[in-house]
């Protein structure tokens, strides 16, 4: 892939269900104070991506943070981080397919939601089997379309607030009425943080894709420096427009927040067009995340931390078994869409946020260890994050506060504790798998003597 593919893939994976659909869930959890949740999560993302970018520039690998966790903390940690991120992306893939089908049914209720989800899964599985070059070009134009849509939304939203559309501008009343700026208090901000964490999920795929990009050290440094502020602008700007334009408890924000803002601005025709673009945007995110999931499980397999069959590639160097394995839960979600069409998206969005926090923690800790090791060994670092190690410790402190606040909210507490149990289980399994791999390697060496 080329540098432009890498930039657009990062945008493509991050601008998906988390922004177009999940932003409504975040607003419902925290009210206008969800903006505070975005500021906190955005600050952590900036620091995490700086740490991750430094490690990628020094040692590009398709397993990315899983490889770095293994190098810093051992095979069990690498196993846990890699499999947890893979599970997370499999859930995201299902969420993207579900959200796309749900929105398309609202725009064009001619086909059932489960059938559309099935079509999307089949089509994008086929695209991911074409080869990384064609995939990268396809994703570039897909992402270009939705970035353009978000920019257009921001411009139209500002014009609306300034009184330039058919509807009267709302002023700032929606920020202070309906219970005030923090209608749910600190607990609402805490509940919104995991939803917001899910929204930012996907930007880290740049680290996975770097291994299949020309001149990764140079291109990753360039992408990391520019991608984060673009994501923050898109997210913060869009959500700010939503909570200013409509009351935070408006039902329309919970289903199609972007379309709801354009309808409120007196531009229902544009809302319908944007709704179709949002469907395409969600499918772009599905496409990018399927790529990321397949490369992560392929990397795990190549390191002996997943079944060896997943390392097989075809003539185009595509890990076919890894791609098909990564689509499995997406096809299960087709059945879930058939059984619980209304509820399944909310369930998927809530599960993912807490798993992403584990990835952040592992990245920050791995960077602390590997940076110090590289400096001790006199290794050249193509990219150096600023403020080391203080920015790492600050980010770790913020994440600890996020987790602590989350434990005070019953629904969030359940997610965090469930993720903690999964982490412990994966660490135990990872330790056993790594031990078996060492024994197997030892037997192989003895057999060749």
Image (spheres, grey):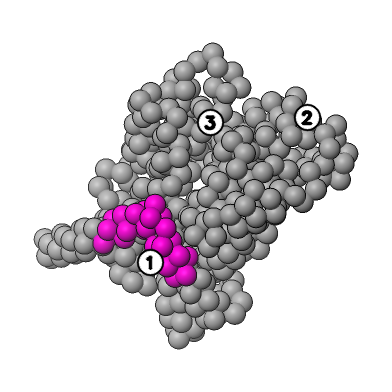
User: Which mark, by number, is residue 100?
Assistant: 3
In the rendered view, does 434 fall on the left or right side of 351?
Answer: left
In terms of sequence position, does the residue under pointer 3 or pointer 2 come before the other?
Answer: 3
Which of 360/378 is in front? 360
Which of 51/45 is in front? 45
Q: Which residues are magenta?
A: 400-424
Vertical order, 300 against 373 (above or below): above
Residue 248 placed where, x, y %?
63, 45
Residue 350 placed where, x, y %?
43, 47
Q: Are marks 3 and 1 in contact (CB under 8 Å)?
A: no
**Which residue ends up furthest to the bottom in the rendered image?**
376
In terms of sequence position, does the residue under pointer 2 or pointer 1 come before the other?
Answer: 1
Image point 38% across, 66% down: which residue? Answer: 69
- Give the residue pinned by disc 1: 69
- What is the C-alpha distance between the residues marked 3 and 2? 22 Å
Question: SS for tag 2?
Answer: loop
User: Which mark, by number, is residue 267?
Assistant: 2
Which of 277/121 is in front? 277
- What is the C-alpha distance between the residues marked 2 and 1? 49 Å
The image quadrant of residue 133 is top right
Residue 61 on the magenta span = no
């Amino acid at each position: 892939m080329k540098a432009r593919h890498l930039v657009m893939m990062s945008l493509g994976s991050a601008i998906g269900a988390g922004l177009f659909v999940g932003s409504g869930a975040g607003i419902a959890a925290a009210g206008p104070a969800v903006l505070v949740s975005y500021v906190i999560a955005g600050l952590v993302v900036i620091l995490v991506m700086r740490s991750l970018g430094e490690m990628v520039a020094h040692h590009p690998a398709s397993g990315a943070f899983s490889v770095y966790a293994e190098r810093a903390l051992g095979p069990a940690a690498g196993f846990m981080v890699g499999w947890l991120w893979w599970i997370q992306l499999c859930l995201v893939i299902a969420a993207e397919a579900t959200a796309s089908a749900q929105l398309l049914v609202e725009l064009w209720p001619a086909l059932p939601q489960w059938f559309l989800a099935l079509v999307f899964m089949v089509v994008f599985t086929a695209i991911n089997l074409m080869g990384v070059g064609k995939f990268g070009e396809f994703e570039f134009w897909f992402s270009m379309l939705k970035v353009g849509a978000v920019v257009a939304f921001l411009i139209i939203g500002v014009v609306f607030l300034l009184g330039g559309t058919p509807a009267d501008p709302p002023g700032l009343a929606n920020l202070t009425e309906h219970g005030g700026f923090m209608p749910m208090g600190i607990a609402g901000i805490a509940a919104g943080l995991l939803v917001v964490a899910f929204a930012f999920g996907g930007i880290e795929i740049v680290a996975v894709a770097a291994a299949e990009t020309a001149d990764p050290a140079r291109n990753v440094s360039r992408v990391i420096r520019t991608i984060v502020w673009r994501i923050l602008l898109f997210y913060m700007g869009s959500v700010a427009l939503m909570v200013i334009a409509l009351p935070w408890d408006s039902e329309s924000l919970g289903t199609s927040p972007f379309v709801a803002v354009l309808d409120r601005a007196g531009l229902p025709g544009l809302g319908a067009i944007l709704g179709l673009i949002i469907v395409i945007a969600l499918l772009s995110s599905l496409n990018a995340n399927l790529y990321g999931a397949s490369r992560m499980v392929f990397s795990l397999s190549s390191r002996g931390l997943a079944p060896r069959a997943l390392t097989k590639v075809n003539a185009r160097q595509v890990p076919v078994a890894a791609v098909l394995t990564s689509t499995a839960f997406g096809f299960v979600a087709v059945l879930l869409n058939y059984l619980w069409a209304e509820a399944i998206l909310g369930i998927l969005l809530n599960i993912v946020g807490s798993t992403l926090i584990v990835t952040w923690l592992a990245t920050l800790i791995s960077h602390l260890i590997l940076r110090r090791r590289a400096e001790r060994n006199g290794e050249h670092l193509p990219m150096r994050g600023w403020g080391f190690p203080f920015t790492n410790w600050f980010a770790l402190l913020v994440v600890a506060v996020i987790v602590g606040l989350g434990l005070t909210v019953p629904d969030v507490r359940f997610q965090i504790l469930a993720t903690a149990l999964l982490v412990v289980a994966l660490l135990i399994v990872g330790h056993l798998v790594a031990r078996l791999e060492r024994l197997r390697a030892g037997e192989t060496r003895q057999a060749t003597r």
